[in-house]
Amino acid sequence: MAIEAGDGELVTAGSGAAAPTTIRDASPADWPGIWSFMRSILAAGETYCWPVGSSEDDARAWWMSKPYGRVFVAVATGGEIIGTAEVHPNQPAQGSHVAGAGFMVSPAAAGCGVGRALAEHVIEAARADGYVAMQFNAVVETNAAAVALWKSLGFAVLATIPRAYQHPAFGLVGLHVMHRKL
Amino acid sequence: MAIEAGDGELVTAGSGAAAPTTIRDASPADWPGIWSFMRSILAAGETYCWPVGSSEDDARAWWMSKPYGRVFVAVATGGEIIGTAEVHPNQPAQGSHVAGAGFMVSPAAAGCGVGRALAEHVIEAARADGYVAMQFNAVVETNAAAVALWKSLGFAVLATIPRAYQHPAFGLVGLHVMHRKL
């Protein structure tokens, strides 16, 4: 899944050796670990607007090289990368004070609060970087875990673009525009 | 201005020598004519999320080279380019059946219905190209003429992202997400 809301458990990043997950800025060397789960998430075609057959290079450029973007990883105690997030200006220039962001969690780590920990870290980082709000342009409405997570973190659905996403199982479904102040 | 609603006059494209404006697909050779008015619209910084000091090359790539994009020009009887529009998939892949679009009209041609003629042409072209809806992600709410034009053409404001645009005169103003079926 592309993001999961966990079971309510809060995984705190950077709280010492006992913490199951550490969130940190990504480096280029993290890409293979990111791709190890991103490829299956993109191939499923259920959560992102992204060509399912596109190449690893395209995915890397898309995720890792957004203008003025910043990429994070969630790292398990064993060193395995189990989640990633990226934050970037949702619009350039006159709109660049509002962040956009994307999140993916390894299906193998689903239900452990990794998505929530990533989201809380990214929200704090975005605030520290000067963004005043965060906006998601295209949350697939059938991605219930993601929608629930964002709502629990203070995001509101400002609009649902009707029939804007071609879901492989459900056909044309809506895309939520979600937003919160930082 | 970036788009103008005209005075209600409908300029019909391609209706013969008497028509004041013809709308057609753009060619690379049209760029200097487009840039002649685009530069002042972008420099004003009131209607698009675009760095006001960016180069002509950047603007050309942004307007003329969107993935799967199509560019149009409005041409006066004397051959002068007085407006332009571009249409492209608002999202890739699973979202590519919804069009996004941008419009600019030369300030020298404001109030003559050029924006409306362009919009009607682009809506028809987008429908013919297979798009099922059109979405604008970021219509500056203070751009009253544009908002009125889109509403008159069947677009609805699905959401207004609060304080999402740094306007040089009005400060932080909202960005409308507007949408209509095709």
Image (cartoon, coloured by chain):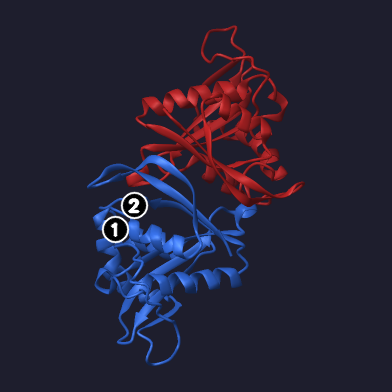
Chain colours: A red, B blue
Residues packed near mark 2 inside 10 Å, few (<14), some (14 to 19) or many (20 plus): some
Measuring from the top left, give residue A5's x and y in whole percent. Answer: 64, 25
Residue wearing tag 2: B50
Give the left or right position of residue A132, taking residue A57 as reference. Answer: left
Does residue B68 sit above or below A160 in this rendering? below
The residue type indicated by label 1 comes to: Leu
Q: Which mark is residue B42?
A: 1
Measuring from the top left, give residue A85's x and y in whole percent. Answer: 54, 32
Residue found 40% across the figure and 75% down from its top: B73
Q: Are marks 2 and 1 in contact (CB under 8 Å)?
A: yes
Tell me the quadrant of the picture where the N terminus of chain A can be found.
top right
Q: Is residue A127 visible?
A: yes
The residue type indicated by label 2 comes to: Trp
**Splitting the image into 4 quarters, where does residue B10 fall?**
bottom left
Give the left or right position of residue B1, taking residue A140 as reference. Answer: left
Element type at mark 2: loop
Q: Nearer the viewer, residue A17 or B125?
A: B125
- As measured in the structure, the alpha-carbon distance from the residue carrying label 2 to the one carrying label 1 is 7 Å
Residues packed near mark 1 inside 10 Å, few (<14), some (14 to 19) or many (20 plus): many
Measuring from the top left, give residue B87's x and y in whole percent. Answer: 49, 64
Does residue B98 sit above or below B162 in this rendering? below
Does residue A67 sit above or below B24 in this rendering? above
Counting residues from the N terminus, which is met first, the one under dot 2 or under dot 1? Answer: 1
Q: As drawn, which residue projects farthest toward the right?
A: A169
